[in-house]
Image (cartoon, helix red, strand yellow):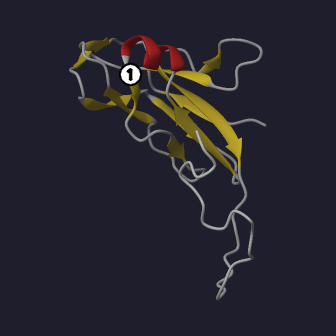
Amino acid sequence: MKIKIVNKSKNDIPNYQTEGSSGMDLQANLENKIVLKSLERKLIPTGIFIELPVGYEAQIRARSGLSLKKGLTLANGIGTIDSDYRGEIKVIVVNLGKEDIEINHGDRIAQMVIIKYERADIEVVEELTVTTRQDGGFGHTGV
């Protein structure tokens, strides 16, 4: 599968770091560094624009190393880029650590995973099929 990319940044296009990587790294496209204070969030531009085929989405995810080592994660968990979106990919980051985090131009700030999806046909009914679990959730099976 191919996706079209327009790169308006001074960085390379997103790429996979290893043969087995499922996500492509996204880099910050900045004129000046950004400093994130503890619990502060910012929108970080990438300079990347993509065109996905219908039936695919790009999921923007945190980089696990940055989350563990610095507390940098995504404010919205996973960001979704729909196939009909043509704007710049921007990443909503948040500093969950206690120390300031400095983000510089070219820093790898997130990863992008391309996922195939199906759209559901909704059927309105009066009741749902009975299961042994029913409405048990939120740890009802134990820790």
Is 36 situated left or right of 2 in this image? left
* Residue 48 x %, y %: 49, 30
Seen from the viewer's position, the closer of residues 111 and 98 is: 98
* Residue 72 x %, y %: 38, 21
* Residue 40 x %, y %: 23, 29
Which residue lies at the image location 64% right of the left edge and 88% below the top edge?
Answer: 126
Residue 123 lies in quadrant: bottom right
The answer to whether one can see residue 32 in this image is: no
- The secondary element bearing badge 1 is classed as strand
Which residue lies at the image location 41% right of the left edge and 41% below the top edge?
Answer: 76
Binning the other alpha carbons within 10 Å of mark 1 as few (below 14), some (14 to 19) or many (20 upward) gives many
Task: Examine the rendered structure and indicate whether residue 54 appears above or below residue 1.
Answer: below
Task: Give the mark count.
Answer: 1
The answer to whether one can see residue 45 in this image is: yes
Task: Examine the rendered structure and indicate whether residue 56 appears above or below residue 102.
Answer: below
Q: Amino acid at mark 1?
A: Leu
Seen from the viewer's position, the closer of residues 143 and 47 is: 143
